[in-house]
Image (spheres, grey):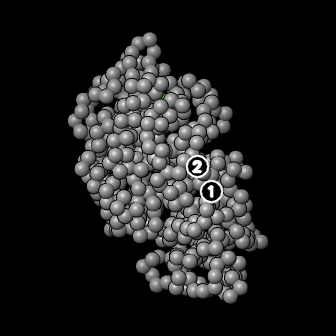
Amino acid sequence: AAVATSIDTTGVFVHLFEWSHSDVADECENFLAPMGYNGVQVSPPNEHITGSEWWTRYQPVTYNLTSRSGSPGEFQDMVDRCTAVGVDIVVDAVVNHMAAGGGGSGVAGTSYSNRQFPDYDQTDFHHTSDLDTNCAVTDYTNQQDVQECDLVGLPDLDTSSSKVQDTIAGYLNGLWDMGVKGFRIDAAKHQEASQMNGYISQLPDEALVFGEVIEGGNEAVKPEMYEPYMMVTEFDWAQDVAPNVISEGKLQYLSTVGESWGLIPSETAVIFTDNHDTQRGNAPLTYKDGEEYNMLNLFMLASTYGYPKVMSSYYFTDHDQGPPSAGANEDTCGNGSDWVCEHRWPGIAGLVNWRKTAVAGESGKPSMDNWASSDDGNTVAFSRGGAAFVVLNRAGNDVSGTYKTGLPAGDYCNVIVGSDKDCETVTVNGDGTVDVTTQSMTAVAIHTGALA
Ligand code: ARE
Ligand code: CA
């Protein structure tokens, strides 16, 4: 059952995909903490196969903390510096399988051969009668096929084995001891949920654990199977919500997003507009879509459902293309060739502290109140508790309106505009209403933590 985790899931975290440890540490101090982000998902920090492609990180060789992102010392320094400013580290844990192929050496120089690694020998993997081979995942309607065969040629660990469970628990507990507070379990769909609990239950109860389980129509393995043990990725959130941002006139339908849409329970859901796979696959919107993508992010952060994870990408044209060689920082963010840094886009960043204010002092997450939508369905407004109010305008034109805010009278700053600009004042009248013009494809957001 869900327990209170040390990372507050009413907040917002960000996936700094392929950022180096030292760049993550700087970002925690310079940007994430001041803007209110409470966690960072980092790329798999353990030793992986060599090669420039991003996906080499998903082929573990050992659990030693040497990776493209840096050394063990740099990893510890990142954890320490981020934690010190209130930003917790979430590790992407690749534990369903090990590196594919006949053998080679990892980025730290460790040699491996077919289905044999320093931590595991051939009997620790699922296999046919021949220890050297295994079936391939081909039939998603068959649970055993999905969970005991090899995913895209990756040797599948026998997660039912206590040796395997204990080895994985050793890796994760080692990270916990270094100060890591959360874990994304990669390819959770390919591990039987109660077997996963064989290592999850060895972690402190406060650890945030969420499994990567992609809901698929008539597949055998369902996200619900994992809910007793961990939080779960809700891939359908973006699939279901994005069409209402892409088409005009549909923002009005978003007041009910949640369980009634067939999504998993809000408290167990990790949501995101896109992730490192779907932005190269079937994501309805990515950074390449500009304003509509921004709008989807704004709705995700302002609304009630799930624990939102902001995707922070690098620019890419080729599916396999690895990260830029330039470090990620203020100069290389948003320059069109290195790092996209969606998490720094002013509206997205502004809504993180907005959300924090909305939930502060409330028990649980306040619902969306004072919901209003324009006749054409393109503009919606709502408040969260007594502390935060937003207007989202998806129309091709600016829209003026009078809305109930639920906020005390006073002068507030619109946190959607860049923090480097002077405060754009929004006045809440004595009766709690506001008269405001919201520009096309953007938002106005105010909260009691940002007064003019
Ligand atoms: C690479 C090469 C392959 C090669 C393999 C072994 O691309 O051609 O066979 O190496 O040599 C990532 C990349 C893979 C890459 C792998 C290892 O995406 O291309 O393979 O790293 O380097 C399913 C799983 C889900 C998984 C997605 C991608 O259920 O768990 O496929 N997502 C995670 C990560 C990925 C990562 C892995 C798992 C492996 O997020 O980044 O792979 O660690 C339907 C089903 C889904 C299915 C989806 C796609 O929607 O419902 O379950 O997702 O189709 O097949
Ligand atoms: Ca498996």
Query: Viewer-proximal residue, 34 or 301?
Result: 34
| Residue 12, percent from left and from top | 50, 60
For the question of whether residue 379 can be seen, the reply is no
Which residue is farthest right? Answer: 375
Residue nearer the viewer, 332 or 347:
347
Q: Position of residue 296 (x, y in %)?
A: 59, 61
Judging by the rendered image, the residue that carries numbered circle 1 is 305
Position of 203 relative to 399 (above/below): above
The crowd level at tag 1 (other Cα within 10 Å; few <14, some 14-19, many 20+) is many
Judged left or right of residue 195, residue 364 is right
Image coordinates for residue 194, horizontal then vertical, percent: 54, 31
Residue at (60, 66) in percent of width and height? 362
Q: Secondary structure at mark 2?
A: strand
In the current view of this chain or complex, which residue is farthest to the left? 109
Assess mark 1: CB under 8 A from ligand 1? Answer: no
Q: Is residue 300 visible?
A: yes
x, y (%) of residue 386?
64, 73
Between the residue at mark 2 and the residue at mark 1, the CA separation in whole angstroms equals 8 Å
Q: Which residue lies at the image location 58% right of the left edge and 26% below the top edge? A: 143
Q: What residue is at 44 percent from the left and 11 percent from the top?
A: 129
- Quarter residue 16 falls in: bottom left
What's the amino acid at mark 1? Tyr
**Secondary structure under the numbered disc 1 in the rendered image:** loop
Under mark 2, the amino acid is Ala
Graded by Cα atoms within 10 Å as few (under 14), some (14 to 19) or many (20 or more), the crowding at tag 2 reads many
Q: Check contact, mark 2 vs mark 1: CB within 8 A.
A: yes
Residue identifier under label 2: 269
Residue displayed at 46% across by 63% down = 37
